């Protein structure tokens, strides 16, 4: 069914979700061992829809995150997409400026999305404004983003000077 590459998150019930680059679909692995396609029909694209009627364009480093309501957020190319627990996929923002295809993604409790780019972090605020949030002063590629309950952003990089940065509010 999948090749195992792509972003992954776990919900409060212990279900695992994978943004599968091999099938351009969001795959759900239940805590009981079941596997199903939550959204995505396999063909690349950015069509909204339910279940296999939706389409995504994923790459190996596709970012995936989840909110407290169990809604998944995923980068499909440079589009931010939401997938409900019922498998309904909708586009939240299209053609995000400065956001490369795929890449790491994080969501904080205030509703800000963070995207990793080469040496910089871009933020999409709840009002739809995209801005450069932070520049790291490194040429290493940003590979991971995470937030904590205090609003701090953690940034992982790879390369010669691989590091983890903590950015505080």
Image (cartoon, rainbow, N blue to C red):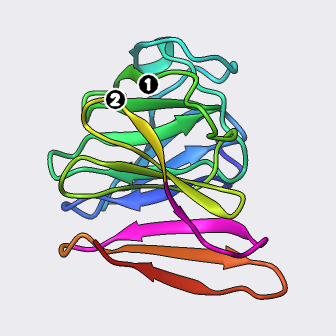
Q: Is residue 61 left or right of residue 145?
A: right
The image position of residue 24, as x and y in percent, is 64, 32
Asked if the stretch drawn in magenta spans residue 30, the answer is: no
The image position of residue 18, as x and y in percent, is 51, 50
Secondary-structure class at tag 2: loop
Residue 156, located in which quarter of the rendered image?
bottom right
- 39 over 21 or under it: above or below: above
- 134 over 27 or under it: above or below: below
Q: Nearer the viewer, residue 88 or 131?
A: 131
Asked if the stretch drawn in magenta spans residue 143, the answer is: yes
Q: How many marks?
A: 2
Q: CA distance from mark 2 to mark 1?
A: 8 Å
Q: Main secondary structure of the magenta part?
A: strand
User: Which residue in the protein does label 2 denote?
Assistant: 128
Q: Are marks 2 and 1 in contact (CB under 8 Å)?
A: yes
The image position of residue 84, as x and y in percent, is 27, 31
> Residue at horizontal 49%, vertical 16%?
54
Residue 93's disc number: 1
Q: Nearer the viewer, residue 6 or 111?
A: 111
Number of other residues with Cα within 10 Å of mark 1, as a class: few under 14, some 14 to 19, many 20 or more = some
- The outermost residue toward the right is 160
> Residue at horizontal 26%, vertical 40%?
71
- Quadrant of the frame with the N terminus: top right
Q: Nearer the viewer, residue 60 or 126?
A: 126
Query: Magenta part of the protein: which range?
Result: 133-148
**Is tag 2's residue or tag 1's residue first in the polypeptide sequence?**
1
């Amino acid at each position: 069914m999948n090749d195992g590459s792509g972003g992954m998150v776990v919900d409060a019930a212990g279900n695992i979700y994978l943004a599968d680059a091999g099938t351009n679909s969001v795959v759900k692995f239940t805590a009981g061992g079941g596997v199903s396609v939550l959204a995505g029909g396999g063909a690349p694209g950015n069509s909204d829809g339910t279940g296999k009627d939706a389409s995504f364009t994923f790459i190996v480093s596709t970012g995936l995150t989840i909110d407290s309501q169990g809604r998944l957020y995923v980068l499909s190319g440079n589009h931010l997409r939401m997938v409900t627990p019922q498998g309904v996929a909708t586009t939240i923002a299209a053609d995000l400026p400065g956001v490369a295809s795929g890449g790491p993604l994080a969501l904080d409790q205030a509703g800000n999305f963070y995207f990793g780019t080469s040496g910089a972090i871009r933020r999409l605020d709840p009002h739809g404004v995209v801005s450069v949030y932070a520049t790291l002063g490194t040429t290493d590629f940003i590979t991971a983003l995470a937030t904590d309950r205090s609003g701090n952003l953690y940034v992982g990089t790879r390369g010669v000077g691989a590091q983890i940065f903590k950015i505080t509010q």
